[in-house]
Image (cartoon, helix red, strand yellow):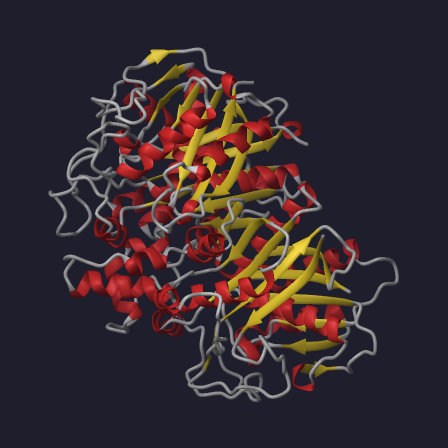
Amino acid sequence: MLYIHSTSCISAQHTFDDVNLVVLNPVEENKLLAVEPNSNQIPNAVLRRMGKAVRMGIKAALSIVNNQSELKGIIIGTANGGMEDCIKFLNQIIVYDEGTLTPTNFVQSTANNIASQIGLFTANKNYNITHVHRGLAFENAVIDAMMLIKEHPLDNYLLGGVDEISTYNYNISLLDGLYKNEEVKNNNLYEIETAGSVAGEGAAMFLVNGKKQNSLATLRAIQTIHATDEKIIASNLKDFLASHLADGEKLDLFLSGENGDCRLNKYTKITEKIADTTTLRYKHLTGEFPTASALSLWFACNFIENKKVPNNMVKTGSIPTEINTMLIYNNYNGIQHSFMLVNR
Amino acid sequence: MARIFITGIGIITSLGESPDENRIALKQGKCGITDLELVQTRYAGKIPFGEIKIETETLKNQLKATESGVTRTSLLALHALEQAINDAKLSASKISSSETAFINATTVGGMCLTDELYKDSNKLSIKSSYLSSYDFGSVAIYLQQRYQIGGIVNTINTACSSSANAIMYGARLIKNGYAKRVIVGGTDSIAKFTLNGFNSLMILSPETCKPFDNNRNGLNLGEGAAYLVLEAEETCKSKKIYAELTGFANTNDAFHPSSLSSEGDGPFLAMKNTLDVANLTPFKIDFINAHGTGTENNDEVESRAMLRLFNEVPSFASTKSNIGHTLGASGAIEAVYSVLNIMHQEIYPNLGFENPIESTKLVPVLSYSKKEISHVLSNSFGFGGNCSSLLFSKI
């Protein structure tokens, strides 16, 4: 259990300053590129050296950690960290035949660079960690934060998920069949019955602690599963709900990780049926990436805080008048699955 | 909170393919740092590495890992992990239980396939069989599938402190009731990517590294993997127990992306907080397995941090001069070495040392000896200021 006190999100949509989830930025060439806000907190000379994942992570983080009491930990989930810098350095190796290379891209490419840059900018010498477990990188960061809060309920922690689209990981994932070959738009992503989704990127950050007072939302429970059989997912979800929902407690909303990949519909169908409530989906706003679930948690907090849900996100059912309890389900490429139970 | 016991260990390094082989080599002061034979790079023969002299194809056959897309990083992991679970006598049903977690660490992942990655990421060839093997998570995902590990599975990358953090995260899963037993550790193989990265930072030594020596001139990269089985006290009542994990801490130096602050706040706090968790005074520490990479920066800062914390610095040594710096695997490899210190009540020499660093004057352990060991502190410090320490104790 953890309490979320403030949030920030950088995505392809208007999620940062003036939040607007109704007017959507379109998918372009099967990518949903994040809109980067300007920042006056970081010198331009420093920003120029950073890759997009680091820039998104640090901008999203600084927007909620400033003027906060000291953070006792910085906990980041990112599958790839600075992939663009990584392959830029790799290309240098090949092009210059391992000659004299500049280390900037190498240093920027290390996956822990986002968390460590946040540590540097906030002069924070406390717990600092980077979880990189692909589609469960953010979920493991959540588990880590939950354990820290159980250990130290009064302390504040920064929890976040970040990943970028680089030309290179796009190429690799496209070859691997993760993205569609035919061009899609935001409004037909779920209609085209083919394999693959659209690429996405973003960063979501949460200031969390063990104090209920003045919190925006509660993350009550989380579960991660490695499996491909949808029956295992279904039985785990039933157990998860049975052990975490109170008697007679109903889900007000189900936020599904459906991403338009027809091979994965079996998972979203069965979980939707078990959730048995209004189903929302968000990947036509964010695209697919390993830490997209961090953005799903941001959406859940946003709905709870503003008591509204944009119509474009509703798949089935009607928007409830009260939003108290939400289930989030995500899976990455049908191998890694997670459930999060979020409350007002 | 539950006490955390170590009930199984597995390891592969350039010193040997098992804990016993590693121990014999450490006792003899052997150095596994040699010219490269298996990695194609222009630095082969020019810079030495702690290379394991077993070809990737041989490893695949030995380990019956003939699925497509398995990388050297995963194979080294598989070798060490299998040893650890056999050593702890974990049955298949125990491993697939939801109470068994697996926490891996790696900084290289599938990037050991530098040339294939170059081609796939630039779309220069038809797709290779490694498309889902390049990322960090690929190693743990492969091992999860192979062993059907049933609990929480994770991968951590905090550069050179990665597997110390994997051990810490695993222990905390047990303490917080998320698991009853965890398999924890790390793996990294020598990659053209990382060797060129470290070379561009000009911190690779052209000779065998000299940790804590006044004339040290950089580190050697190595490769390897190590895993430990940690179990809650209640689940291993009738089992052999090697040692107890009594303390751990993770801090950040918050100074510079690729070097440590001169006063070493990160390293100092990591060691200090670890002792606080274990509720021990510095005086109780019998031996420190130092991070000791052999770089100008690390060894001096680590020395200063030890001098800050300890009135009298305990016996210490670095094993980087035996096997090189194995990056994401080093914290776990050195955890296994710390367990060997405790199991056999002995300490191993720090190779390549001649003269102490002028400003700190610290002299590491220079020869093998038997020693009464109750508590071993193991340090792992990485890029991005990520510093972690672990404390292993005799039970």
Quadrant of the rendered image containing residue B174: top right
Left or right: where does residue B35 sit relative to residue B376?
left
Residue that extends furthest to the right in the rendered view of this protein: A248
Residue at image location 45% in from the left, 24% down from the top: B339
Residue at image location 63% in from the left, 41% down from the top: B179
- B49 versus A110 height, above or below: above
Residue at image location 87% in from the left, 58% down from the top: A247
For the N terminus of chain B, give its image quadrant.
Answer: top right
Q: Can residue B5 be seen by looking at this rendering?
A: no
Q: Can residue B175 be seen by looking at this rendering?
A: yes
Residue A2 rendering spot, x and y as whole percentages:
70, 54
Quadrant of the rendered image containing residue A20: bottom right
Between B307 and B97, the one lying in front of the other is B307
Residue A173 rendering spot, x and y as whole percentages:
40, 70
For the C terminus of chain B, give its image quadrant.
Answer: top right
- A339 versus B345 height, above or below: below
Residue B86 rendering spot, x and y as whole percentages:
47, 32
- A321 versus B114 height, above or below: below
Left or right: where does residue A207 sit relative to residue B204?
right
Counting every numbered tag in the picture gives: 0
Between A211 and B73, the one lying in front of the other is A211
Left or right: where does residue A104 sit relative to residue A147?
left
Between B278 and B43, the one lying in front of the other is B278
Residue B291 rendering spot, x and y as whole percentages:
36, 33
Between A62 and B109, the one lying in front of the other is A62
